[in-house]
Amino acid sequence: MIAFENLEVRYGATAPPALKGLTLTLDRGIVGLLGPNGAGKSTLLKALLGLLRPSAGGGTVLGIPLGAPEAARLRGRIGYMPEYDALIEDASAYEQVAFWGELSGLAPEAARDRAHEVLYFVGLDEARYRPVSGYSTGMRQRVKLAQALVHSPELVFLDEPTNGLDPDGRRRMLDLVLRVRAELDTGVILASHLLADVERVADQLVILDQGEIKAAGSMAGLRRALARRVELRFLDPLDAAQEAALTELGAVLEARNGLYDLELAETDPLGVFRWAEAKGATLVQLTPRHDRLDEVLLRALHPVRGTGLRPTPPEAPRPDQAEPAPDNAVRGTGLRPTPPEPPRPDQAEPVPGFPSTMGASVREER
Amino acid sequence: MPIYAPTLPPAPDLTQGHPPVLVLMRFDLARLWRQKIGRFFGFAFLLVLIVKLAVIYVKYLLDTNVALRPMQDFARTVLAHGADFQADLLNPTSYLLWFLVALVGGGLVARDTLYRVRPLMYAHPVAPKDYLIAKLGFASALPFAVLLPFVLLPWAMSLGVAGIHGPVWPTAPLRLLPALVLISVLMGALAVGASSMAATPRAGVGWVLGLVLGLSALAGMVHGLTGIRAVDALNPILLAESWPQLFVGVDHPLMGWAPALLGTAFHIGLWTFVAAKRTLPSEAVI
């Protein structure tokens, strides 16, 4: 659906890059683009729409190269819901949705019919003839979603769709996003700084910060990895040999005061008991660590936090994870694996605690 | 509680639509309709047009009615004749027209800036040149549409009541229509350029009026100080008034062909360039 390599975007020739050499491949689905304000999410969407020309690198969206002459035609296949209020205040929802439909290539009469249908789809059937200046925030967000869907795009970019909405409004908007994916078979890129929104609807995740991809992968992979996090306590402190042997169980994330945080290689915790018996250690506590996604996000964004964390060793592919993929692309996650490289002196340490399946699926180049 | 549709059927064919330029211009026309300024300007221009038509009939009567012959000398002193009369068919409305162009054209680009819809337009299959052509086209079509009846109706009436020897020359439209095109493009370019520099429609009106009146004052001062008439080519009001005079060939036009051509080309080029720069996608998204 989308692929880009070494994508760099600047606002002006002398300005620092807003996107710093991003490399990523995304499959069709709902992709959560997550990051704090100013991370580069909107810039990335605008670059993918062809509104900003890459200063270096490039990519393809729906098979069309970024910056190509046919980019204008590509925009007819994409819907864009901007973050800000891009509504024509003196026009009704019906008038402006029909206008955006015409601008996408619909004939005038078809655009008017379509405006009725799509406004009904987003739940604005009754209010569609009123000027949008009198709309609530939730209704305004739905008008923006309607204009993004009016021409049945193959891919829709939703930039902070739940901005300013109350919990009920957020739930309704996210339900609509799920319906867009499920019923219309439209790919969705959802940019948000709200983790709960992304967690609820996305099946792929990209974490951006300061114009760089901090992590990316499938939500299923992330959840699987989170399910394998455990905390172990032994009756007696482990000796050096036993500590070293802990890596047989999986990645050791943290060790403090006789407590060991591990990301197990196997989902079955019985292996831990077998390991303890074999090594002569008495296991007195095995607690599943139900890390929330926000903890993972914080670790990705602030890798220096949490002293005493050890970097995750590279994980060997497990038999149940191995899937045939052309060109070293990992299907399912839709992300390209990073070829194993020796760490460079200037390379940042791997994000501690971030699931290794996620970290390995992204190649970030500067 | 909103009611949601069971599902959304696929959209019809996307290749049947009109070109983006046409869609944008039609939407601007709908906006103008919503502004409800048509009544005042419609009444004002209609009044001027009725007076012009009445003058044509009076001139016809003076030429043909024996009873009115004693008034002919008086009429000659108060009414224009020949080429001056033909040129005047467009000129008396120019100030009112500049005001209309400022009110409508000042908000053309500024309203999109205020509502932040331009980036969304560019997120559709709309190129910056489509946007610019649509805005320039609409801003130019407005004065053209307003002034067109001032050329055609007096001509048709003159032909109708007096034939080819009436007060309006039979060839008047051939001379006045090119002038009208130049005036319209000049007004449209200036309005769109000024509007592109404004953040709100009201500021856009101010920009247009400020540029028109400011440049007129500047050109007048420089002309007064130096005595060089060609400086008047900076003055958009004089430029607009001089084109009908040049095309119909009055004896003493406000300025010559060369200054009028250079001045008009300068204004159209400068304000189109400003508008093009101010409506680039990069400008729109920052």
Image: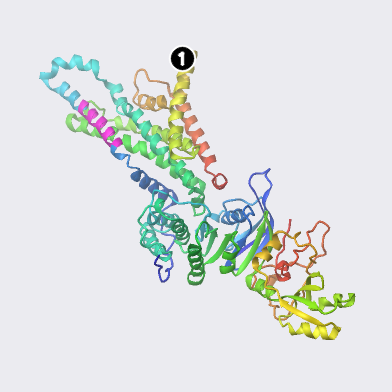
Q: Is residue B18 magenta?
A: no
- Disc count in the image? 1
Residue B166 pos. (x, y %): 21, 27
Give the camera-side residue of A41 and A249.
A249
Report whether residue A7 is seen: no
Q: Judge whether B277 appears above or below A198 on screen.
A: above
Badge 1 marks a residue whose secondary structure is helix
> What residue is disc 1 on?
B224
* Horizontal side of residue A220 vs B69, given as left or right: right
Residue A18 pos. (x, y %): 66, 51
What secondary structure predominates along the stretch shown in magenta?
A: helix
* Horizontal side of residue A1 vs A212, given as left or right: left
**Residue B93, image quadrant:** top left
Give the camera-side residue of B128 and B195.
B195
* Horizontal side of residue B67 vs A107, given as left or right: left
Give the residue displayed 49% in from the left and 54% down from the top. B125
Report whether residue B77 is seen: yes
- Crowding at dot 1, Cα within 10 Å, few <14 / some 14-19 / many 20+, comes out as few
Q: Judge whether B140 appears above or below A227 on screen.
A: above
Query: What is the three-letter code of the residue carrying label 1?
Result: Gly
Residue farthest to the right?
A240
Residue A6 pos. (x, y %): 69, 57
Give the camera-side residue of A19 and A267.
A267
Specify the subunit that label 1 lies on.
B
What range is drawn magenta here?
B40-55
Q: Judge whether A30 appears above or below B277 on screen.
A: below
